[in-house]
Amino acid sequence: MNEHYYNSKDLAKFGNVVDFQKPMGEKFFAYYGEVFKEGELSAREKSLIALAVAHAVQCPYCIDAYSTDAFEKGWSEGQMMEAVHVACAIRGGASLVHSVQMMNKVKGIGM
Amino acid sequence: MKSLKAQHSNLAFAHQQIEIIEHGQTGDSELIPFREKLYQTGLYPLKPTGVEIFQLNIGKMCNQVCKHCHVDAGPDRKEIMTRETMHQCIDILQSNPQLKIVDLTGGAPELNPNFRWFVEEISKLNRHIIVRCNLTIILANKKYHDLPEFYKLHQVEVVSSLPSYTQDRTDRQRGNGVFEDSIKALQMLNEVGYGIAGTGLQLNLVYNPAGAFLPPSQAALEKEYKQELKQKFGIEFNSLYVITNMPISRYLDYLISTGNYETYMEKLVNAYNPVAASNVMCRNTISVGWDGFLYDCDFNQMLELKVESKGQHISEFDINMLDNREINIGQHCYGCTAGSGSSCGGAVA
């Protein structure tokens, strides 16, 4: 095993996942390619969404890839940071909104 | 900011640049040689498809000092094409009708004192003329304010750099105040009909990345540029050319000083596109330096790699020999074959 769990050079080896399971890997990459094509959303818009999601799922490979991709596609530093704040707000909100359950429970058991 | 030459930088010397480009910063580059890639693609040795474009670099003097400039141009550069060399170029055009396009570049070509005379003479030969205008020159001095009319008179195609439709990115690459002046200059060009449908006056913009990354899709970016420039500034233009930055001169200096050199080169190599390789601009272009020497392209010119032909100077110009020469290649050529490819006319694949 590597000394570190994450190695930036491993990003370039992403395609190698087909080595262990070809049909599923190939289907995934075909789907992935299709998703990021120009569609009702532009490839540029999709790149910014991917950047935000990358932060939400805290994937260092995805953050590396989509920081470059979004910047290449012309998003400014400010716009990219706002996208990360959107991810952050949703993640934070997801925790906080569950407090309604906590409140319901406490109200249910309290006097 | 001064040119690398004025700063007495090592990278002002072509042989120092070639050393790094060919062997890496530490001399142990493991990148696949460009020659080998071409061989695998069936394109080695790289041969011309027939020279049609006569690209003339008429001087390294420029009113701007852009961070990515492969010419290392700037106000402190004094190299300029003489009228005598220009006469030789005109003679070559007269005797070689296959040279259909004359592409004038620099520096800022307009700073050559014989620029207008030269354009007028070429215009008499009925050739398509391209001027690579940096836009800000139009506002740099009162004597340049009428350039849009002058270009119109000679039906010159204007090709101008604008690395972003936002001020921030443009000024970071090209210097403070460049965006504002570029916008004013584009509006002046629009006023005389440049970029306006139906006028036939071609105004094309050039995008190149403001950093150590590759350009995005030309078609998608052109759409955004058109929308943003129209909406915010009322500006219209014909096409957007997307160009990859070459690891030469000031851009090489930028890559090295920011620790991006090796990664950028890897990126170029990994993005090698055989289709782009077969359409590289050096196959139909001859580049002439300010002193009349001949090169395969403006990049080889800056690396002082003269054509592999018996006649290496405009005074010995022989189109048949040039059409049959072997094009000089190096690791920098990956810049023209990455992704959708890159040329003075944008993407090639």
Image (spheres, coloured by chain):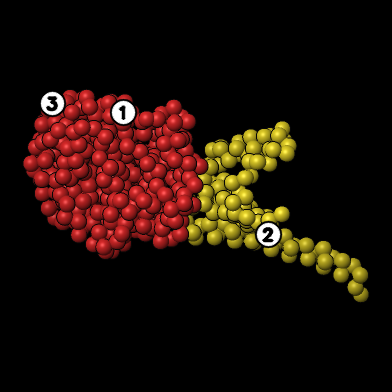
Chain colours: A yellow, B red
Asked whether, in this view, residue B307 is left or right of residue B316, the answer is right
Residue B192 in sight in this render: no
Q: Percent x, y for residue B332? A: 38, 44
User: Measuring 63% from the left and 41% from the top, which residue is drawn there?
Assistant: A15
Where on the picture, by quarter, is residue B345?
top left
Q: Residues within 10 Å of mark 1 (few under 14, many from 20)?
A: many
Residue at image position (62%, 52%) is A61
Sequence-wise, the earlier of marks 1 and 3 is 1
Viewer-side label of 1, 3: 1
Estimate the spatial distance between the alpha carbons at disc 2 and disc 1, rounded to whole Å: 50 Å
Single out the residue that lies furthest toward the front.
Answer: B28
| Position in image of residue B206 (x %, y %) | 34, 44
Q: Amino acid at mark 3?
A: Ser
Mark 3 lies on residue: B95
SS state under label 2: loop
Q: Residue A79 — which label? A: none
Q: Horizontally, is B134 left or right of B291 in the view?
A: right
Tell me the distance, in whole angstroms, between the alpha carbons under discs 1 and 3.
20 Å
| Amino acid, disc 2 | Glu
Residue at image position (19%, 56%) is B77
Q: Is residue B131 above or below residue A99?
A: above
Q: Chain of mark 3?
A: B
Q: Residue furthest bottom?
A: A111
Q: Residue at x 64, y 61 (%)?
A: A88
Q: Percent from the top left, x then y, of residue B190?
A: 26, 43
Return the residue nearer the eye: B232 or B60: B60
For disc 2, the marked residue is: A3
Q: Percent position (x, y) of residue B138?
A: 20, 51
Quadrant including the N terminus of chain B: bottom left
Q: Nearer the viewer, mark 2 or mark 3?
A: 2
Name the disc covering residue B48, or none.
1
